[in-house]
Image (tube, coloured by chain):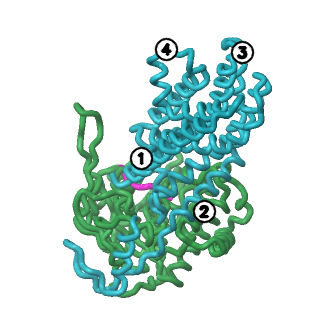
Chain colours: A green, B cyan
Amino acid sequence: MAMLGETAAIPHAAAPRTPGAVCYRVAGLTKTYRTGRRSARTEVVANDAVDLEIGRGEIFGLLGPNGAGKSTLVRQLTGLLRPDAGSVELLGHDLVRRPEAASRLVAYLGQDSGALDELTVALAIETTARLRAVEPAAARAAREAVVAELGLGDLAERPLKKLSGGQRRLACVATALVGDRPVLVLDEPTTGMDPVARRAVWAAIDRRRAEYGTTVLLVTHNVIEAETVLDRVAVLDEGRVIACDTPGGLKATVGDEVRLDLVWRSDPPMTEPAVAILARDAVRTGRRWTTRMDPGTARELLAAVTSGPAFDVLDDFTLSTPSLEDVYLALGGRHEGLVKG
Amino acid sequence: MSVGQDADIAGGTARPAAPAAGLEAAAFPAVPLAPATPLWAGLLTVYRAQLSRVRVSRVPLLFVAVFQSVGIMILMRGVVDTGSDSAREAVVAGSSVLVVAFVALNLLAQHFGALRAANSLDYYQTLPVRPAAVVLGIAAAYASFTLPGAVVTAVIGAVMFQLSLANLWALLLVVPLSGAALAGVGAVCGLLAPRQELATLLGQLGMSVALLLGVIPADRMPWAIELGRDVLPSSYGVDAFIATYGSPDWASFAANLAVCAAVGVVMLTLATWAFRRTARD
C-alpha cells in the first residue's frame, strides 16, 4: 500500500550531444493575439520575450498548463507562425526571415490528424515520406521500416479514422519519423497511448538520437513522462519561460521538501497530535490530505500516524520526493497545475 | 519556397552561416537543408492520397450526387417543355454538371474549411511541398471523384429525355475543366471563409446557384438572372455539354471550355495564395 519515493527522478543515459552545437537559438520571441470583436477586442500575449537555447541531440521539453503558450511557441519554431518580435535560429538558418527552411529540417507532429484521417496507416506514412522528397522506392522502404519499428503491422491497411485515439497517435508518430529529419518537434506525441506503444515511441526516438544525433523538442502536459525522458525542460507559464534546467536541477530548486499524501477511510482522530498538525497544514481533496514538509518531520509524523489509533482509519499513504509539478507550483505557476500520470 | 530562395539557403552550408541581423554568428556551419519536393511529385502524391479516400467514401459521394441530379431531372420532366430540344438538353447537361458542382465546389469548400478550422493544414505547411501542389492535388482529386457520377447522370438523362449518347465522351473534357473552375471556387471559399460554418454555407450556396441557374433552360430566364448565369463558371461547362447534342457546335464547345479553363487557372491561383495566407498570419 505504501509507495516510498515513487516519483523519484529516474537517471537516464547522458545525451550524445555535440558539445556547444546549438539546434534552436531563440531570443526575445514575442507573439500577441487579438481576440474578440471590435468593441470587446483584447490583446493576449501568447509568448512574452521567450529566450531558449536547445542543443543538438538534446531531448528538450516544454512543460506548462493549457494556455501557457506552448503551442504558439512551437508554431513559431516550425515556421507556421511569424513572430511579432525576436529571433529564431534553427541549425544555422534564420527562421524569421526564411520560415520555409523549417519544413526541410524539422518533422512536426501537431495535435490534429485531420489531413490524414481517411488514409490508411501505410499510405499516410508513405505519402508523408514522399512529401518530404523521399524517392518512391525509398519511401516504401521507410514505411516498412517504421511500421515494423512501432509495431503497426496489424493496423497498416486500416484508415486512421477507424483507429482508437492512441493507435491513431502512434500512426501519426510514424509519419513524423519517416524522412529522417535532424529535428523532431512533437506536440504531445503519446496522448492516449498504452504503455506498449509509449515504450515503442521512446525506443524509436532514442535510437534516432543515438544513431543520428536527432534533436527532439517535446511539448507535454505529462510530468511523469517529462521526468523520465527529458534532458532539459523549460517550464512555461502565461507565455513566459519561468524556469529552464534538467528535471533534477529544477527539482533541486524546490529544496529538499517531500510530499506526504494520506488517504483516510473515515474521519481521523483529531485528538492525536500528529493528525492535528497534519490537519492544520494539509490541502484536502475529498478524503486525501496533501502536505509538503522537510523529510525529518514527514518521517516523524508518518511514524506517529502509522503506529497510533489513526492507522485504523488510514486507507493509503505516499511519501514522495518533489515532482516537476511541485516545481511548477513552487516557481509561482498561477494555474492549477499539470497533469499527473 | 522559390528555387532562388532555396539555392540561397543551401549556399549557407558551404561557408559558415552568414549571421543575420540580431543573431550571433554561429560557431558551427549551418546544417544543409533536405531537398524540397518538386511540384509534380508533390501534386501526384497529394492526388494519389486523396483519391484513395474514395475507397472510404465512394458510396455516399457517388450516390448522393447522382440521386440528387436524377431527382432533379425527374422533377424537371414535369416542368419543362419536353418537346423542345434546347429545354431537354439544358436539363440533362445542367444536371450532369451539377454533380461536379456538388462535389468539387460544395464538398471541397467544406473539406478545406474543416481542415483549416482544425489546424490540419499544418500538416502540409510543415512539409517541404509547394502550396500549389497541395491545392491542385486536392482539387484534382475532388474533380476526379465527380466523373463517374456525371457520366451516370448523363446516361440516365439521355435515356429519360431521348437524347443521343454519341458525344458522351465530351464529358472527359467537360468534367475536368468545369471541375477545375468549380474546385477553384470551392477551394477559395473554404480557405478564405473566416469560419468553418461560413465555408460550408458558401459551398452550399454556390451549389444551389449552380443548380438553379444550371438546369433551367437559359432562354426562359429573365434578363437579370441570365446575367447571374453568365458570371457562374458552371454555366460554361453546361453550355459546352449542350453544344455536343444534336448537330454539335464544336466552336461553342471549345469556347465555353476555354472559359472554364481560364476561370480554373485564376481561381486555383487565388486558392494557392489563400492557402499560403492561412499559414504565418
Q: CA distance from mark 4 to mark 3?
A: 20 Å
Q: Is residue B271 above or below residue A201?
A: above
Give the magenta-colored segment's residue range. Answer: A336-341
Pick whichever of labels 3 and 1 is earlier in the sequence. 3
Q: Chain of mark 1?
A: B
Pick whichever of labels 4 and 3 is earlier in the sequence. 3
Question: In the visual, does A255 lie left or right of A192?
Answer: left
According to the picture, the residue beneath numbered tag 1 turns out to be B270
Q: CA distance from mark 2 to mark 1?
A: 25 Å
Q: Chain of mark 3?
A: B
The quadrant of the image that shows the N terminus of chain A is: bottom right
Q: CA distance from mark 3 to mark 1?
A: 41 Å
Which sits in the foreground, A244 or B196? B196
Q: Residue at x 70, y 61 (%)?
A: A156
Q: Residues within 10 Å of mark 4 (few under 14, many from 20)?
A: few
Q: Residue at x 36, y 86 (%)?
A: B14
Judge depth for marks 1 and 4 and give the one in front: 4
Label number found at residue B82: 3
Q: CA distance from mark 3 to mark 2?
A: 50 Å
According to the picture, the residue beneath numbered tag 2 turns out to be A127
Which sits in the foreground, B247 or A125? B247
Pick whichever of labels 1 and 4 is earlier in the sequence. 4
Q: CA distance from mark 2 to mark 4?
A: 50 Å
Q: Residues within 10 Å of mark 1 (few under 14, many from 20)?
A: some
- Evaluate whether residue A64 shows in this view: no
Judge depth for marks 3 and 1 and give the one in front: 3
According to the picture, the residue beneath numbered tag 4 turns out to be B222
Which amino acid is tagged 1? Leu
Q: Secondary structure at mark 4?
A: loop
Q: Position of residue A191 (x, y in %)?
A: 54, 57
